[in-house]
Image (cartoon, grey):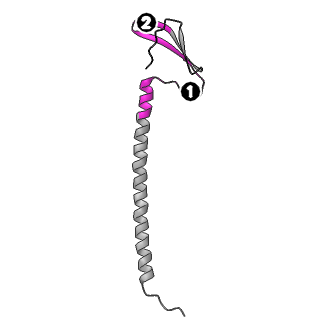
Amino acid sequence: MLVLSRRINESIVIDGRITVSILRVEGEVVKVGVTAPKEIHVLRKEVYDEIQSNNLQAVGASRSALERLLNGKKTAMQANKREMEAVCSSPQAPVN
């Protein structure tokens, strides 16, 4: 981690495209301004962490739903296979 000291109205530049400026200090709270291109998402860390957690939960739920769906299809396919084997192994009626 790079640690920098900045005063009010001073900035740092990241990758030539993102500017982080110190706007004011109020007690223990530092007001920071971020200027970045629209395609770069700038989020507070707690919001970012919440999104990541929700995404992981959604993937887990989707994965278990997919597994249930696939297991259901596998069971149906096995039942169809048994039915086809039964039909194919039964004696055929003579054709006139």
Tell me which amino acid carries mark 2: Glu
Q: Position of residue 51 (x, y in %)?
A: 44, 32
Q: Residue at x 40, y 6 (%)?
A: 27
Which disc is residue 1 wearing?
none
Q: Image quadrant for the N terminus?
A: top left
Q: Marks 2/1: CA distance?
A: 28 Å
Q: Is residue 17 above or below residue 5?
A: below
Q: Indicate the quadrant where residue 29 lies.
A: top left
Magenta segment boundaries in residue numbering: 23-52
The residue indicated by pointer 1 is 40
The residue indicated by pointer 2 is 26
The kind of secondary structure element at disc 2 is strand
Q: Nearer the viewer, mark 2 or mark 1?
A: 1
Q: Residue furthest bottom?
A: 96
Tell me which amino acid carries mark 1: Ile
Quick one: label 2 or label 1, which is nearer the N terminus? 2
- Could you say which is closer to the camera, residue 78 or residue 15? 15
